[in-house]
Amino acid sequence: MTQAILTLNAGSSSLKFQAFAVDDLSVLLAGKVTGIGGDAKLALSVPEDAAPAQPMGGDHHAALAAVLDCIDRHDDDWQVTAIAHRIVHGGTSFAAPVAIDDDVMAALAELVPLAPLHQPHNLEAVEASRALLPDALDIACFDTGFHAGQDPLFTTMPLPQRLRDEGFRRYGFHGISYEWIARRLRADHPGIARGRVVAAHLGNGASMCAMVGGQSVDTSMGMTALDGLPMGTRCGAIDPGAVTMLMRRGMDAEAIDHVLYHESGLKGLSGLTNDVAALIQSNDRQAQFALDVFALRIAQFAGRMAVSMGGLDALVFTAGIGENAASVRDAVVARLSFLPAFQVLVIPTDEERMMAIHVKELMAGGGACAD
């Protein structure tokens, strides 16, 4: 019987999944459930000859049930023995992957206010897996974990101590992706890995990370996944006074969240879409303007991170936009041409495999799963 690790990445209306063989981490099955809560459908990307998307219904519990049914229909005597969950926020308590029990679930639930649009759905997937696969080991892998060792100089917010004591600080996100990049650099570019690297994870959610010797030093996202770069529909860093101004106009927290998380970023700047491929192809002036702002902000944050590291040896692009939008990469690099020479790399991210590696090492007694 083949032991398998199932990785889950749960969003508000989607559930990405991959099944890996424990022995060699080969991909057995991969796909995505979209439209959860509405017209939900499950589609497979591995195997390549998989059937078209199939309609289904329900919540994350129903989505995972459909995934498990799909595994049952495709497997050759597989057994899912462990499940890796992408958890957006680990706060200050969780710096490394950890087995999930009732105490861990309670602690993660307390962090929902720090990631209100992500954490609840992550935990829904955990609850579903614990109910549907009670004999499997559930492991939490944290987006904040890779940044946990940053110096307080980079994590402290200039706020009153009473608020800092309540958890108001910078955490950083996309850590699983950055950990994979650091791993690939060590394997493929050891000289660069030992130096000063800025990694740009550019997708619908976008952030940047300064790494020295493969360790996170600084990052663009802060206490929430809203800070930093403008993203697909998220505003990124803005004057906090703009938020209080919206409050004075009568908007409540939910309405403000909707504007900042769902109506802003590239979508808000262009007035068209958050799809970078569509913006690149568009002849609309606002589409180009949105891309220009995006490239400018990326370059500005790269400059900031060069200050944090005392220089820049390499700039790494990753994730959907970073890997595929050459014109965006070129625009960023052009704005940084005044700096001393640095290398530019494109490295595909693989958050799911990074999670599977963590789980395999935990299962083998690898403790905190250090590389």
Image: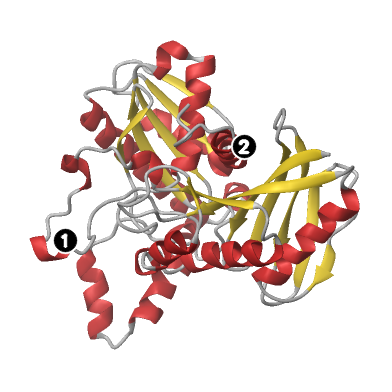
Q: Residue at x 52, y 64 (%)?
A: 123
Q: On the image, numbered disc 1 is attached to which residue?
A: 165
Please tell me which of labels 1 and 2 falls first in the chain.
1
Mark number, residue 353: 2
- Give the class, few, some or many, for how many residues have Cα within 10 Å of label 2's Cα (few <14, many ≥20): many
Q: Amino acid at mark 1?
A: Asp
Q: Judge whether residue 14 can be spotted in this image.
A: no
Residue 192, x across and y down, in percent: 41, 16
Q: Is residue 114 above or below residue 222?
A: below
Near-viewer residue (311 or 175): 175
When the figure is inspected, residue 184 is found, relative to residue 140, above or below; the finding is above
* Front-lying residue, 189 or 167: 167
Please tell me which residue is depicted at 91% across the width and 44% down the height of the picture.
49
The quarter in which the N terminus is drawn is top right
In the orientation shown, which residue stands out farthest toward the left?
160
Residue drawn where x is 45% and y is 35% of the image: 331
Q: Amino acid at mark 2?
A: Arg
Residue 145 at what x, y percent from top left?
39, 44
| Position of residue 253 measured from the top left corner of the image (x, y, whole percent) | 34, 79
Q: Is residue 273 left or right of residue 266?
A: right
Secondary element at image label 1: loop
- Mark 1 → mark 2, Cα distance in angstroms: 35 Å
* Residue 301 vertical placement versus 7 (above, below): above
